[in-house]
Amino acid sequence: MYLAEHPNAFLSNPKEPYYFSTDFPKLRRVTEENDYIRLFNDADPDSIAIGEATAGYLFSTEAIQGIYDFNRDAKIIVMLRPPFDLVKSFHTHQQFAFQEDEPDFSKAWALQETRLQGSHIPRQCIAPQFLHYSEVGRLGKQVELLCSIFPRSQIQFFLLEELASDPGAVYRQSLTFLNLPDDGRNSFIKFNEKKAHRFRWLFSIFEPRPRWFQAIIERVRSILGPTGWNRFQRFFIKKPKVSEVPDSLRKEIKELFREDIRLLAELTGKDLRSWQTDEQPDRPAANSD
């Protein structure tokens, strides 16, 4: 999101059009190439980097090839985090997006096989594949596909902990990767923190969102910009309650991802040994707001 505010960069609105995710048809905001190209019509003539930010492309089995066929010179930035943290956070995000109706992560994890058979799918869920959390977390498998299609020189990997510890360094490395000049930015507020709806009943009325409602949201977001939109959202959201995960399940999930993490380390050249430990971070207290 920081890149979207760079004077020589342009990010599409919506920022996640899912155009290339043909395996997630109901998530695609545009389905025709001409409509996709029009998402970038407002780019300034001085824009050096023009793109979008659909995080789900990495999980898609069809998007990466589609991107390459569309623009084989495209540059890809990938932000990675430990698989256990990823699936736990993604479960919370799915609830926020009205795609998951089981608030307890342990129960949602146990429902995976049942859901693969087409049972217990939330009524409003438009991409049941995202409920298969054990596949969502296989970043090594996903990155392997990415690296088999795009040259390694066109891919930049970052770890979420790198962004958290030194956002300025990550930002400037991204600028270099995208051939963007340093704009002197030194303020980096947090985006995409875990969140829950303060007025869930209100937003549930508009799920799935009709086009007119989504158009209003996108218009407001465009007017406010990334920072203003983040501040605006704070009135409507709150911190979610923490769903505790039993130690046994935590260890089971970490063991499940062990080999995939080793593959990811080989592909990215990142030191991921800390991801392999069974040590638990301090658990935040449940938010009762």
Image (tube, helix red, strand yellow):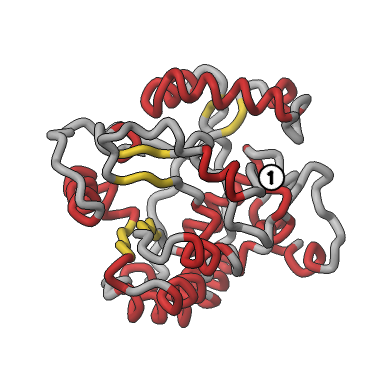
Residue 199 percent location from the top left of the image: 66, 21
Which residue occupies 29% across, 38% down?
47
Q: What element does badge 1 sit on? A: loop
Q: Is residue 183 left or right of residue 260?
A: left
> Which residue is more in the foreground, 258 or 55?
55
Above or below 104: residue 189 = above
Q: Identify the image quadrant of the C terminus.
A: top right
Residue 216 percent location from the top left of the image: 61, 20
Q: Is residue 214 left or right of residue 186?
A: right
Q: Residues within 10 Å of mark 1 (few under 14, many from 20)?
A: some
Residue type of the residue flagged with mark 1: Pro
Residue 230 occupies quadrant: top left
Q: Is residue 200 visible?
A: yes
Which residue occupies 51% across, 32% down?
239
Count of numbered circles on the image? 1
Q: Is residue 243 visible?
A: no
Which residue occupies 20% across, 51% down?
179
Q: Given the current orientation, which residue lies at the most extreme right position?
A: 119
Q: Which residue is mark 1?
A: 103
Residue 236 occupies quadrant: top right
Above or below 273: residue 60 = above
Residue 132 percent location from the top left of the image: 67, 63
Residue 110 percent location from the top left of the image: 72, 64
Q: Identify the image quadrant of the N terminus.
A: top left
Q: Is residue 271 left or right of residue 35?
A: left
> Which residue is more in the foreground, 42 or 102?
42
> Which residue is more in the foreground, 97 or 275?
97
Which residue occupies 44% across, 79% down?
148
